[in-house]
Amino acid sequence: MIFRRSVLAAAGLVLAAAAPLAAAQSPAGKLVLYTSQPQADAQATIDAFRKVHPGVEVSFTRDGTTQLMNKLRAEFTAGAPQADVLFIADAMTMEALKKDKRLLAYPEARTEGFPVGAHDADKTYFATKLITTGIVVNKAAPLRPTRWADLARPELKGQLIMPSPLYSGAAAIHMGVLTRTPALGWGYYEQLAKNGTQSARGNGAVLEAVAGGQKLYGVLVDFMAIRAAQRGSPIDFVFPEDGVTVVTEPVAILSSTRNPAAAKAFVDFLLSPDGQGLAAQQGMMPAHPDVAAPAGFPKLATVKMIPADIAAILAGDEQDKERFADLFGR
């Protein structure tokens, strides 16, 4: 009996000691997220994260990548950055922040099984999805484009709309890749401008115009078009034969974070099977190849992706945007 009491007492001491340790390891407190995800997706992501980490209170600001970066830069200048985590469309923006030492390296992040090159080699930002940009077509359109050059054909005059790289990170990558593709280049964008192509402030405006029939063709990210088509919108999405451009919707922790434990937990969740499964549930291609793509997407192996030199695109980004603005306006 004495032995049993001693064992129970010892066990109680072990449990009492372990409880504070477990509490210390469980992230808690406030976490501020800046994201370019659609509003509903951002909320669903936060809700799923908080089911795993209920002690973390998450607030978020949702806007286009360019607007978020303008907000962040103003906060950096004021010496008061608010965000802990940045979850946006493109790696180019992350590269710029990394160059300015604004990102926190997270070498312990679990990146096993992801494609080589999906994440930053120094583990300051991490791919969460593969989002391609292709062509959206209203079903009433008389012509079905199969290649990027088809969008500059005279038959499409005044009927094409595309997101502006001045407001969309994915559009900036798209422009940077296509203007550095020998078969297209800036001559292609000049042809689009001469053909009356309209520039919109974001992908949402492109989808609305093509689905509503105001324009018959658009340049659009895949998941928005595929989701809308599944809901009955009169559109089709085309993966061009000569390749699509890709963004990875990376996530990163700001070096100024006030809650690194919660920020790392958020990254861990997005890279986990649950987080990758959530991406598929939201109608996007997961970055991890072991997680099945959502309905409506082709097999990844059948989609040609145009390689992107992110460093080169970043180096020429300001000049590219000025040139775009000269052609299409702001």
Image (spheres, rainbow, N blue to C red):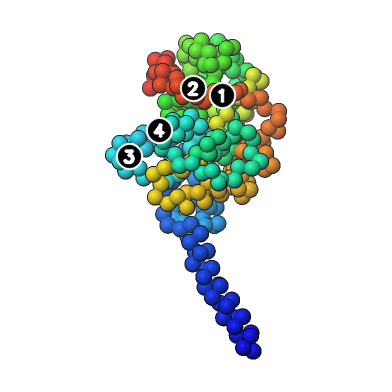
Q: CA distance from mark 1 to mark 2?
A: 8 Å
Whichever of labels 4 and 1 marks the residue nearer the N terminus, that label is: 4
In the rendered structure, the answer to whether residue 263 lies left or right of residue 275 reads left
Residue 113 position in % (x across, y down)? 66, 41
Between residue 88 and residue 85, name the one nearer to us.
Answer: 85
* Label 2 CA crowd tier, 10 Å (few <14, some 14–19, many 20+): many
Residue 233 quadrant: top right
Q: CA distance from mark 4 to mark 1?
A: 21 Å
- Point out the image quarter for the N terminus: bottom right
Q: Is mark 1 in CB contact (under 8 Å) with mark 2? A: yes
How many marks can you see? 4
Marking on residue 100: 4
Q: Is mark 3 in CB contact (under 8 Å) with mark 1? A: no
Residue 95 position in % (x across, y down)? 47, 31
Q: Nearer the viewer, mark 4 or mark 2?
A: 4
Q: CA distance from mark 4 to mark 3?
A: 14 Å
**Residue in view at x 63 percent, y 33 percent:** 116
- Point out the image quarter for the C terminus: top left
Residue 174 position in % (x across, y down)? 52, 24
Marking on residue 75: 3
Residue 9 visible in rendering: yes
Whichever of labels 3 and 1 marks the residue nearer the N terminus, that label is: 3
Residue 224 position in % (x across, y down)? 56, 35
Whichever of labels 4 and 3 marks the residue nearer the N terminus, that label is: 3
**Label 2 SS:** helix
Kindly identify which residue carries mark 2.
Answer: 313
**Label 1 SS:** loop
Q: CA distance from mark 4 to mark 2?
A: 17 Å
**Residue in view at x 52 percent, y 73 percent:** 16
